[in-house]
Image (tube, rainbow, N blue to C red):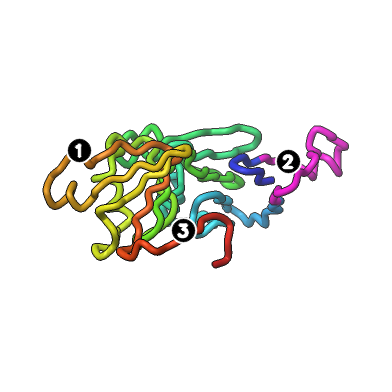
Amino acid sequence: VHRGDEVIVRNLRAYFDQGDTSQTLLLEDGDRVLVPQLGTGSIIITGQVMRSGVVPQEVGRSNDLFATVTLAGPNRPTADLSRVTVYRKGEKIVRDLTRLEEEGDTSQNIMLEPGDIVHVPMATETVVFAGEVARPGALSIHGAKERDLVRLLPLASPNPEGGLDRVTIYREGEAIVRNYRALVEEGDMTQNIELQPGDLVYVPADDVNNIMVLGALQR
């Protein structure tokens, strides 16, 4: 059962065959129930990956956690690779794949076993980019040592023709305007700012007569 950022595993076979009522669960609005179809030597990967579902373990291919998550294609703007969780027969194993990638800490990798469920959670520390950028949306800044505007905005590929002299950071009811063009072209570091989780960074169009609409919309 996927409930928000939580994965709850229940053994319904034990409930039906043995009457183990601890394996039941009261479902809530928004829950997603996954009944796996595991073959021999298969695992399941869920969460912030591009290819979720059953992953067969194959001879001749590395079946460790890092290789499996990489194969599934983690959605790096929103995936929290520092809290990848493996559910194994009632056990919960958490590994920091960011440390493995950046520091080579191989203790954060494990070999997967048939029946494992791997969950890549959504990052809780994100900055959202919108407006005149090629890659709008959330960007995880969890574990990032450098979180300022001059380093993070290029990751969203801002439009050079956009209103880069009026980049606006919306933060808890506050609107902070920075001249990103002066920051980059003239080295004016007074225009830089440390970004915080929850910030919305908006690059306006060169035409000031625009309205920004965000949220759960189709258009």
Q: Which residue is mark 2?
A: 10
| Residue displayed at 31% across by 38% down | 147
Crowd tier of the residue under label 3, counting other residues whose Cα lies within 10 Å: few below 14, some 14–19, many 20 or above: few
Q: Which residue is mark 1?
A: 190
Q: Which residue is mark 3?
A: 212
Q: Along the line of sight, which residue is nearer the eye, 17 or 103?
A: 103
Q: Position of residue 88 (x, y in %)?
A: 60, 38
Per the rendered image, the range of residues in magenta is 8-32
- In this view of the protein, can residue 152 be seen by the observer? yes
Q: Along the line of sight, which residue is nearer the eye, 126 or 79?
A: 126
Magenta-colored segment: predominant secondary structure: loop
Q: Magenta stretch containing residue 11, yes or no?
A: yes
Q: Magenta stretch containing residue 39, yes or no?
A: no
Crowd tier of the residue under label 1, counting other residues whose Cα lies within 10 Å: few below 14, some 14–19, many 20 or above: few
Q: Secondary structure at mark 3?
A: loop
- Mark 3–mark 1 distance (CA, rounded to whole Å): 26 Å
First in sequence, mark 3 or 1: give its number: 1
Question: As shown in the figure, which amino acid type bears the numbered disc 3?
Answer: Met
